[in-house]
Amino acid sequence: MEARFMSWSHYSRYLSSRLARKAAKASHFGAPITMSQQPRIRMSTGPGAQKRRLYDGLLLDAGGTLLQLAKPVEETYASIGKKYGLVASESEIKQGFRRAFAAPWPEKLRYQGDGRPFWRLIVSEATGCSDTDYFEEVYEHFAHGNAWRLPKGAYETLHDLKNNGVKLAVVSNFDTRLRKLLKDLGASDLFDATVISSEVGYEKPTPEIFQIALDGIGVKASKAVHVGDDEKADKAGANAVGINCWLWGTDVKSFAEIHKQILLEDQ
């Protein structure tokens, strides 16, 4: 007889009776029953079928994973730059952005506070334009939720994971604009912890930022999975502290896949 064919109250009585018989039998042979021998049942808190968790915690990278740009960065830089006399093409801006973003940063943190020093350099290197007003307009554009979007199915997946007891955290190398962006996109209340490098003083792949996230959601490394888009910052960083990691766009390509790999429907 299996739990899925009974109401929870009936199953509770059945389970209690079964354990009592097992305890009596064990006692007869002088072997007491232990807690580790008792069946562990995780019940879904939402409607529908019972679901079994393969992980108790999900950590998510922000930029490039949870947060996707509404338009390509080079298109936005070029569009805003027209009134400032920007002559670089979108292709040139794209190449310049990648080159500037990959360059080493001399400070401990790229994103300190609002991240303006870092982003001022990126915008200038990518576009060849160092106009202060241009930079401020670009910076403010990306400070609002309408410059970003959540991937298809992200909200529904996170909501269902949360309803089924999975603890959720954002772990991101980002500046202080991130909290507002999550709020603008209606996602901030879904997370049990939001760990931002500019606030905690550590950037991925350092182990400290991942440990802060684990402590924030109260989940052991072995029971958590991290999803991010960077081989070094996300995968190597998470693996170094014992957290499994799925690379966004390679290991998982949608939030529906994330859902299926964390929650299993009991048949």
Image (spheres, grey):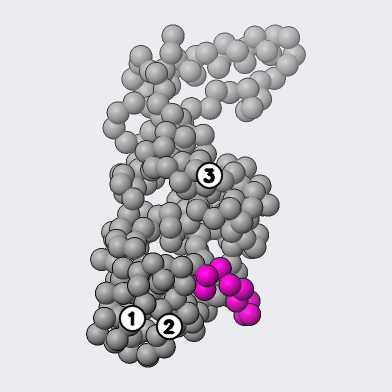
In the figure, is residue 267 to the left or right of 103? left
Alpha carbons under labels 1 and 3: distance apart = 40 Å
* Crowding at mark 2 (Cα within 10 Å: few <14, some 14-19, many 20+): some
Name the amino acid, label 2. Gly
Q: Secondary structure at mark 1?
A: loop
Q: Which residue is mark 3?
A: 246
Q: Is residue 103 magenta?
A: yes
Identify the residue at image location x=26%, y=81%.
82
Report x, y in % for residue 182.
Answer: 35, 63
Earlier sequence position, callout 1 versus callout 2: 1
Which residue is nearer to you in this view: 221 or 45? 221
The answer to whether residue 73 is visible is: yes
Q: Which residue is mark 2?
A: 128
Report the label total: 3
Q: Secondary structure at mark 3?
A: strand
Q: Secondary structure at mark 2?
A: loop
- Say above or below: 7 vs 246: above
Residue 87 — which label? 1
The answer to which image quadrant residue 47 occupies is: top left
Name the amino acid, label 3. Trp
Name the amino acid, label 1. Val
Identify the residue at image location x=55%, y=51%.
218
**Label 3 vs label 2, nearer the camera:** 2
Task: Give the magenta range.
Answer: 99-109
Earlier sequence position, callout 3 versus callout 2: 2
Residue 224 — which label? none
Q: Is residue 161 magenta?
A: no
The answer to whether residue 179 is visible is: no
